[in-house]
Amino acid sequence: MRVLVIGHNGQLGSCVVDVLQRNRSLAILGIDYPDIDISDPHSIDLVFGGFDPDYVINCAAYTAVDDAETDEERALAINGAGPREIADQCRKAGAWLIHISTDYVFDGTATMPYPEDAPPSPTSAYGRTKLAGDRAVQELLPAAHYLVRTAWLYGMNGSNFVKTMLRLEKERDTVSVVTDQVGQPTYARDLAEHIGLLLDKHPAPGTYHGTNSGEVSWYDFAREIFRLAGADPDRVLPTTSAEFVRPAPRPAYSVLGHDRWAEQGLPEMRPWLEALEQAFADGIASTVD
Ligand SMILES: NC(=O)c1ccc[n+]([C@@H]2O[C@H](COP(=O)([O-])OP(=O)(O)OC[C@H]3O[C@@H](n4cnc5c(N)ncnc54)[C@H](OP(=O)(O)O)[C@@H]3O)[C@@H](O)[C@H]2O)c1
């Protein structure tokens, strides 16, 4: 089976390639910007023509959530038009598409985990552009896609909250973190394993929520990061979103339900704290100077 991984230098894409490489029966091509520009249909066409994939995993995206507020046109070209073109090429080639999406398609006003079929209503430019991509994938490949929504991703590559907290722990006496945003920290390696499961087990198409299970606030997550780093968790101080204003609104409750995995006879992803402990065992602390 021939698998094209778009965005293979990114936080998630790099883990996906690592995980899939264990399976010797797969021919894998990882590619990223500038060797492919998913906002350019001609660039996508060239890559498909040269590789002829059976499966495409699209991990590439415009992920600068705050910048998207003032750059929505560019974000839409990458997050909306890009996946539409990739899906169209998959349709023509008879290939399946695993497309990665986000909790930001929801407004975060829920009090219970969002089921896979909850109606989206994004409040940020990033969320709107990602939703445009999701809808294109669903429309063009109704029976040949997996839409995998994730959230609060961290891993060894790139910048993320865990690495920021580890750096700030070294630089400052205290760090203030919001208590009023709750979500599911997700270890990129775990999500890559579950994407591998979709390839192996080939369950029914549609939406799957790719987040570690349970829920926690950024504040309590930061405390666990300090604890695992051997630092005093009381150096993390509570603050609120009203005091820590960012250009893009953040969902207050970003917890995704995982029923679809069980319906398809597959395990959901493990609890977030177990995953964080694994990331420390894998050496995430040593990636920060
Ligand atoms: N990070 C999170 O917390 C989070 C949360 C929810 C959902 N997600 C979703 O999860 C997926 C993976 O996120 P991630 O954190 O792994 O992202 P990432 O580390 O930012 O990686 C994205 C990759 O896409 C590439 N890219 C950007 N524009 C491109 C273009 N026009 N053509 C081709 N490639 C392009 C980037 O290259 P450059 O570095 O050169 O720009 C980068 O290598 C994305 O769909 C994202 O929306 C992420």
Image (spheres, rainbow, N blue to C red):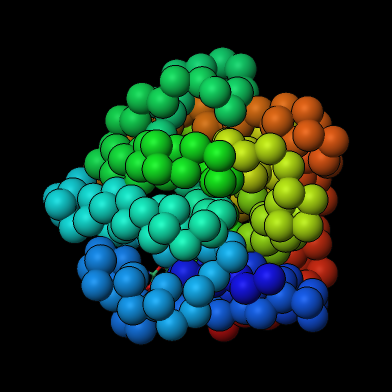
Count of number-bearing discs? 0
Q: Position of residue 289 (x, y in %)?
A: 57, 83
Q: Quadrant of residue 2?
A: bottom right
Q: Quadrant of ligand 1?
A: bottom left
Q: Residue at x 62, y 39 (%)?
A: 205
Image location (x, y in percent) of residue 28: 62, 78
Q: For the point 55% across and 46% down, which residue is it? A: 145
- Residue at 22%, 56% (x, y): give it: 77
Which residue is nearer to you in this view: 53 or 102? 53
Where the N terminus falls, by quadrant? Answer: bottom right
Left or right, 55 with reference to 229: left
Horizontal side, residue 209 vs residue 5: left or right: right
Inspect this view and state whether residue 168 appears: no
Residue lying at 29% horizontally and 49% vertically, measured from the top left: 80
The answer to whether 192 appears left or right of 158 in the picture is right
> Outermost residue, top direction?
111
33, 229: nearer the viewer = 33
- For the question of whether residue 111 can be seen, the reply is yes
Residue 206 screen position, x and y as percent: 58, 36
Say above or below: 206 vs 154: above
Displayed quadrant of residue 61: bottom left
User: Compared with residue 245, is residue 60 higher up or lower down, i.e. above or below?
Assistant: below
Q: Nearer the viewer, residue 93 or 16?
A: 93
Asked if 145 appears above or below 172 in the picture, the reply is above
Instruction: Give percent across and percent down for residue 264.
Output: 78, 34
